[in-house]
Amino acid sequence: MREVFVLGVGQSDFGKMPERSIADLGGQAARAAIADAGINSAQIQAVFSSRVYDAMITSQTIMKDLGVTRVEMVNVENACAGGSTAIRSLYKDIAAGFVDLGIAIGVESMTTSPIAGKLIPPDRDDLDGQLGLSMPVLFALQAQRLMATHGATPEDFAQVSVKAHDFGALNPRAQYQKRFTVEEVLASRMIADPITLLQCCPNTDGAAAVVMASADVAKKYAEAPVRVAGSALVSGDYDFRRSDITTLELGARAAALAYEQAGVAPSDVDVVELHDAFASEEIVHYEDLGLCARGDGVGLLRSGATSLGGRIPVNPSGGLLSLGHPLAASGVRVVCDITDQLRGRSGASQVPGAKVGLAQMLGGAATGLDAAAGSVHILTV
Amino acid sequence: MTNPVPLREGLFRETAAGPTLLASCCTACGHTSYPPAPRCLDCGSEAQEPVELGSDGELLCATVVHMGNHRYPPGYTVGYVTMPHGVRVFAQLAISAGEDLPAPGTPMTLEIVPMWREQEQDVLAYRFVPAPGKESAHA
């Protein structure tokens, strides 16, 4: 298997922009990534794109405006982990030697999707969905268990959102560059106890893109390109196999695979970007990613280790909570933000001297599974 | 008036002893699947026998959903209930708005009720009602 490198990253604006098309949003991100890589778009040999809602030929729709035609283009969907799936798919094609240079794109227009302004439901025919389950409900029930088993409090969950917005206030790309207090988060409208509105990621339009290359190509364009040291994508397991709902086992499994491939331990990781669609789940991910011992997630949060200046900052971009969550874009966006961290380009939220970064994304709910798709990528310089 | 239709066939039924969820139990490994599975989800054996989970469970956790959807108005309560054989079931809970959420461990009992209307028919599904006086069947 060949080594794979990130050559360039790019993002579109994030926000509510119903007037902007998929080609427009995706094109903005792709152009930025291509410019960042310093390549010519004609060199691109493969395109993997992901979109959840109303998806059809997303890659071709975007790339035809960039002068890229004829090459292999693949369009994938894996709920919120779709962008990670596009990255993983391109990674495998480069690692296997099928192509030397390609681009992965995630794009979503949430404001024009059929679920605009609604709580994201499972598939139409899903049993639990028919009985009233939606994504915030799933995570609210998990938060209820965190309070029963971990000693978590509503203030802890609110603190996750406060932390995200502290970071987001430093990121010019965030949809909400605004700080909040714990009291303000708790006083916002209740969505599903204990999750309040300011503990939910906003509905957001946006796109992100990553140009990746083999070692031979990468060394022509960058002196020290960011290496994809570990790449994992797994599907969920049966819910009955987990003893409690305070873990998302697929996330732990993806992390273990990526750590093993990269030859790093959780304690080696300098910076993390992860799925914080709902504030409370971040505490679960701390444990699933091995950033702390099982059961210590609340303690890790309270210690400040995951905040700006802490031992292991989590979501220094501002996370989904302040950036917003254009579903399929987020899995690509976390790789963009980790790449920027490892290149020292993250401005006010830069983690000093970051050498090892982890980008995680999870997606999808279906009756009987813990979740649908989980992905972890470990990047190093 | 037309007859109500179940949400799905083979998930639940009324019996002389009360409503029950319908599951399958693997005679090879003993794993119980709900909804019932033609093939064991744990070991893969096709040796499955039907089993009734009954109506008694114990609340694991609950939440009130403050945003409605096309079927349910805001303010409905849902939760996970642990049933016999350790089966964890997601369902709505019959709690009135403003009532306190029942505590984890509260005994719950199943009821089969019309949950919504579709094509001028009531659609039957199940939900749980707190039964604080009742001994939980869950070991």
Image (spheres, coloured by chain):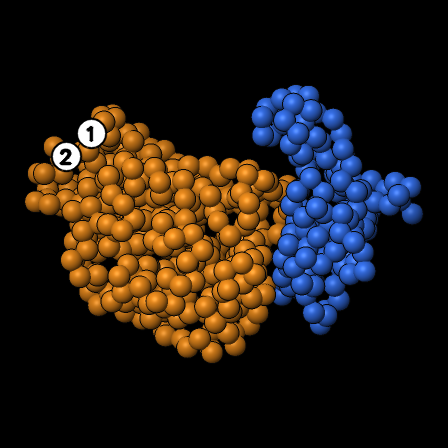
Chain colours: A orange, B blue
**Residue A37 appears at what percent x and percent y?**
17, 46
**Residue A275 appears at what percent x and percent y?**
40, 53
Apparent side of residue A105 relative to residue A372 in the rendered image (left or right)? left
Secondary structure at numbered mark 2: helix
A161 is higher (above) or lower (below) than A138: below
Residue B69 in which image quadrant: bottom right
Do we see residue A37 in this rendering?
no
Secondary structure at numbered mark 1: loop
**Residue A159 appears at what percent x and percent y?**
42, 69
Apparent side of residue A197 relative to residue A345 in the rendered image (left or right)? right
Residue at the spot of label 2: A215
Q: Residues within 10 Å of mark 2 (few under 14, many from 20)?
A: some
Task: First in sequence, mark 2 or 1: give its number.
Answer: 1
Apparent side of residue A149 relative to residue B60 in the rendered image (left or right)? left
In the rendered structure, the residue with mark 1 lies on which chain? A
Q: CA distance from mark 2 to mark 1?
A: 8 Å
Q: Residue at x 74, y 56 (%)?
A: B107
**Residue farthest front in this picture:** B139
Residue at the spot of label 1: A2
**Residue B133 appears at what percent x and percent y?**
81, 60
**Circles 2 and 1 in contact, beta carbons < 8 Å:** yes
Q: Residues within 10 Å of mark 1 (few under 14, many from 20)?
A: some
Q: Residue at x 47, y 78 (%)?
A: A183
**Residue farthest top in this picture:** B46
A285 is higher (above) or lower (below) than A48: below
- Say what amino acid the circle numbered 1 marks: Arg
